[in-house]
Image (spheres, helix red, strand yellow):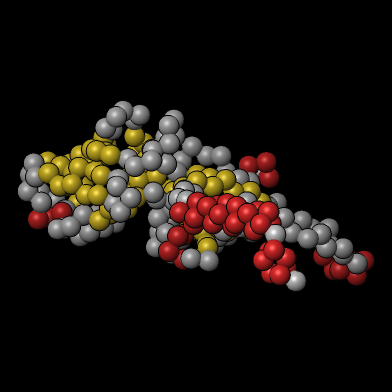
Amino acid sequence: MFEKHLAVCPYCRFTVKQLTGELQSVTRAWNSKTVQPVYYYTMSPMTLPEIEYGPHLLAAQGNNKPDRPDSIALTTPDNKFLLKAVFDSHTGDTWLYLSSDDPESARNVLIRPFGQTGEYITDDRGRVNLGKIDWPDPSRHTAEIRLPRATFVLAPPADEMQKGEVTRLTSPAGDTIRLTFSGEGRNRKLEIDIVNLANREPGSPVRIALRGPDVISIMPLSADAEPKAFFEKVRAEGKLEIYLYQ
């Protein structure tokens, strides 16, 4: 019926043609738009459904309440990441466990837990050992996480780098850094110059982290056009990984 009407109605044919062109234009714009990746999240406690306890269960529990829970679970607003803080009663340490549907995204993530000034980076299993800390009160059950916006791996190995030799590394997104070693022996000084940060957010602090064979260091970067960072006593053996966070 509709097709028969279009065959005899020039006005409707014009309207359909116009709407079809607008729809195709919107579809092309939607498919070609660039989706900016998200690198920063604020985490808050998970909301669990309320459970109504019966008298028999309350009696079984008794009146003894622990001074603190054994764990805290935090999540991002989109539930993409889950962070669990667990207190180890045997060692007195507090561990953080970051998880995601994509295990790769939980690695090398910068975490600032419980409003602390200290920052930590997850290992290859998404873990951080906070050591012996005061268990946070409920008002501080929050955390900030930052995913690396760029990752660099130094090749050839650092022990093949000559003193004063300059190496440039570029990420797929166009972030570029320049590395210069100085000093002798196993413990060297590494200078990292940030040559270019693609799509840097104005006013947002940038941090750089260096992971060596057995240690990781985190340093803030200034707001200069080409900020730089210095790392002391960098072991020459093994792989060096460099991460940028914003």
Instruction: Tell which of 151 and 91 is nearer to you.
Output: 151
Task: Kindly give the residue lying farthest to the right in the view shown.
Answer: 55
**Rendered residue at 52%/39% (across/down):** 116
Where on the picture, by quarter, is residue 32? bottom left
* Percent of width and height locating residue 179: 18, 44
**Rendered residue at 69%/63% (across/down):** 8
**Rendered residue at 42%/41% (across/down):** 246
* Percent of width and height locating residue 126: 46, 60
* Percent of width and height locating residue 198: 34, 42
Asked if residue 241 can be seen in this view, the reply is: yes
Locate the N terminus by quadrant.
bottom right
Where on the picture, by quarter, is residue 105? bottom left
* Percent of width and height locating residue 132: 51, 49
Q: Is residue 13 left or right of residue 216?
A: right
Task: Kindly give the residue lying farthest to the top in the view shown.
Answer: 224
Asked if residue 86 can be seen in this view, the reply is: no
Q: How many marks?
A: 0
**Rendered residue at 43%/64% (across/down):** 104
Q: Is residue 131 left or right of residue 43?
A: left
Instruction: Tell which of 163 and 173 is nearer to you.
Output: 173
Q: Is residue 206 left or right of residue 44?
A: left
Instruction: Tell which of 210 and 36 is nearer to you.
Output: 36
Instruction: Tell which of 165 and 38 is nearer to you.
Output: 38
